[in-house]
Image (tube, helix red, strand yellow):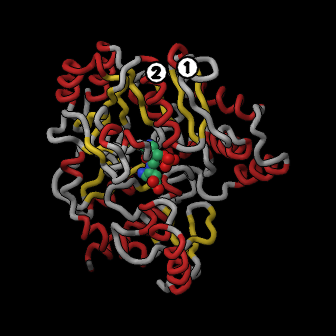
Amino acid sequence: MKNAASARWFRRAVRRIPGGVNSPVRAFRAVGGTPPFIRRARGAGIEDADGNRYVDYVGSWGPLILGHAHPAVLRAIREAAARGTSYGAPHAGEVEMAELLAGALPSLERLRLVSSGTEACMSAIRVARGFTKRDGIVKFEGGYHGHADFLLVRAGSGAATFGVPGSAGVPKEAAAKTATLPYNDARAAEAFLRRNGTKIACVIVEPVAGNMGVVPPAAGFLETLRRETERCGTLLIFDEVITGFRLCWGGAQTLFGIRPDLTTLGKIVGGGLPLGAYGGRADVMKTVSPEGPVYQAGTLSGNPVAVAAGLAQLRALRGSGVYAKLDGLGRRLEEGLRALGLTVNRAGSALTPFFCDGPVTDWTSASRCDTKRFARFFHGMLDRGFYLPPSQFEAMFVGAAHTPAMIERTLRAAAEVLRVR
Ligand code: KE4
């Protein structure tokens, strides 16, 4: 693919923006090369500054389940923007959004709209700490919940100990209250909570992990977290920023029949504009300012244009039967890639081809992947017009704009790449 225009833009970008990007993964550091600068997108297709076209399996990292520039979403954005882009005051749309989210996820008795998944997770954890008056939190290796200090934490010396900073700039005190446990290890979680539970405000978990590549929950894992958190008065937070409205209308909590105390949302609920949400038990959310003592705020929280985009996408999703179509396309892609010798994990329309032998069930197994082979596969696919996430540890997303023919073309390209690289 010719990339002179993207290369020019990238050279300008790196002079003013760290890594030339506004979010690290976009810099292609994990796969090498120059990231295409995208100039337009529609449906399942994106086009870069050099006019190259791709079938897009990133979908802006999950939000665009109906595809890029969906007509209903664009219309809603145009109409909302014509009424003003932000009021900094309550408006009807945020009430309609709150009611729609609560209707889809019954655990969301009360909720707050924010502007990103990071804000949703950061706020939910502050609420859990305020409600329980405890400081400790538990996350899982390979789990990502945005970039709040206390979440950028690596496992300490032993996995079941409190954490150490996972990023420069995070004070060790901020990490010291965060324990990182192995994902899908129910026994480790049970043992840790039995020993430390009375100090733990919350356990935050991706009910289907998406940030080590897609890793579904092992049988009994989520049920153990629910039982053990209940036992010690710790709040269970389902981070459904990826899984919310991705796996099914009611998210992972509906699919697995588990009621968390708090849920975080993002991505799809904003229809491609900045919107997140957190919420859950009414008694817990009563602690949020101005009703209660836990402060959380945001200039653009519940932004009317973002809410309009999100409502349009969710209303187009609701009852559309699209999930059956997405599952079918995802299954065909999974089976086709597996037939080429790859390990593939899938949850609905989110899937990851892993370049490793054996199953991928947690961070330890995911981290054994051959990331150089993945990088070669990534570029082979990009050169053939298929835009995959530029990291082994991310999810591919199939959306409503993808077609069976696109999936077949993708599989033919993959077979060619895997034969030649
Ligand atoms: P944002 O702040 O990026 O909107 O959401 C943070 C977040 C929270 N929880 C989960 C489960 C998430 O996956 C994310 C963000 N996901 C990454 C990619 N896996 C976003 C892409 C990026 O960082 O550029």
At a point 84% along the width and 50% down the height, the residue shown is 82
- For the residue pair 153 and 173, the one nearer the viewer reads as 173
- Other residues around mark 2 within 10 Å, as few (<14) / some (14–19) / many (≥20): some
Q: Vertical placement of 350 versus 263: above or below?
A: below
Find the distance from the CA under tag 1 to the CA under tag 2: 8 Å
Q: Vertical placement of 345 versus 92: above or below?
A: below
Residue 367 is left or right of residue 321, and the answer is left
Residue type (three-letter) at the residue carrying disc 1: Pro
Residue 329 is at least partly visible in this image: no
Residue 231: name its quadrant. Answer: top left
Q: Which secondary structure lies at badge 2?
A: helix
Tags 1 and 2 in contact by the CB under 8 Å rule?
yes
At a point 36% along the width and 20% down the height, the residue shown is 134
At a point 63% along the width and 50% down the height, the residue shown is 273
Residue denoted by label 1: 293
- Other residues around mark 1 within 10 Å, as few (<14) / some (14–19) / many (≥20): few
Residue 356 is left or right of residue 16, and the answer is left
Q: Position of residue 127 (x, y in %)?
A: 48, 25
